[in-house]
Amino acid sequence: MASNDYDVIILGAGPAGLSAAVTLQTSGLRTVVIDRISKATQKTFTVESIHPGVIRQLEYMDLAEGIGCSFKGRYNRISNGDHWKSLNPYSDEIWYGYHICKENFIQSICHQAEQKGVYIKKTEHFPKPEWNESLGNMITLGPERIKGTFLIDATGRKRAGQRDLKNKVIQYSPEYLVMAGVQNSASEEFTEDETAYFLPGENYWIWIGQLDDQRQCWTAVFRKNDWKSFRKEKLAVDLETADRWASIPWEFAMQPEMPGVFACGDAVGLLDPASGKGIFNAIESGVMAAKAVRSVLDFPGEEQLIKYTFQQWSEDRFLAMANQLKASYDQLGIRI
């Protein structure tokens, strides 16, 4: 069995994992990002919407060059069909959010991270993490074993490492069914230029974005147990055009107790898409996880305190967003 040694192993080449890797790269640590790919589930046009702050984050890390190839549309305000609000609550400066092809977006960031020296190892094997008292953290990929002093779980909402890392998960909501897709026919009622629409219903909400090719991307969230009743209703989107489905409860995961192991991004705090800052928070969380690793190296006897401090930062951020989201739902009359 082949063996490779690294200072840090990162599971997941999404926004959280890549931002952690680029941050660690500036510290001169030998880092590998393990990116599991599955040909059976690979998509070519998954559309998501990103907060304006994401662009500024990437510019700060020098990862923004070329991401424009992923842009499929933009918006500077959000409407409920009657009223609208600007994305910039502070000044008259126009802030733009973007509807992106997520695959192209991640690919662009990966390419730039690799140019900075980040090693991204792609594999079809499911990474199996384990900890050995004498050898430390190890990842098994089929016939190959990779060893690292530190391990960062950035596997997103799938939380691939949880079954092995055994970190405690607290659930704050029932499961919601999240559906998303792209529809060719657009309702004339929701086609105002550079406007995204958030349409609240009693037991659901719908997000609609205008794409440059005149199509609409959309996301809808329903209570999981009763969403089927909405298929017969006349909605602003055609549910038959959905190409993605996911069950998402609001969850927070404690940091793993294993030595040298940290978790970040959606692998720690997961909310439904109405929070509006999924990728923004993933990037920020990845940077903070990398800084936690750096702190442990500088103060090796303080790992438990550093991990606890990072966990408290993550939990405070999660609860603040969850409370804000719940208040928004209550104000809008959404009961899911």
Image (tube, rainbow, N blue to C red):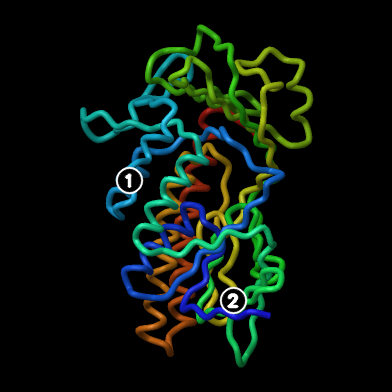
* Other-residue count near label 2 (Cα within 10 Å), few / some / many at <14 / 14–19 / ≥20: some
Would you identify the image quadrant in which residue 193 lies?
top left
- Residue 279 lies, in percent from the top left, at 46, 46
Q: With 245 as the anchor, is 254 left or right in this view?
A: left
Q: Which residue is mark 1?
A: 64
- The front one of 167 and 69 is 69
Q: Residue furthest top?
A: 188
- Between 194 and 68, the one lying in front of the other is 68
Number of numbered markers: 2
Most distant residue in the bottom direction: 134
Instruction: Give the label, 1 or 2, closer to the camera.
Output: 2
- Indicate left or right for 221 with 108 as reference: right
Q: Does 111 sit above or below residue 165?
A: above
**Which quadrant holds the N terminus?**
bottom right
Q: Vertically, is 85 above or below 17?
A: above
Residue 306 sits in which quadrant?
bottom left
Q: Quadrant of residue 257?
A: bottom right
State which quarter of the image contains the C terminus.
top right
The image's mark for residue 146 is 2
Q: Residue at x 71, y 66 (%)?
A: 163
Residue at 52% in and 81% down: 5
Q: Where is residue 325 shown, x and y percent of the image?
A: 51, 41
**Residue 166 — which label?**
none
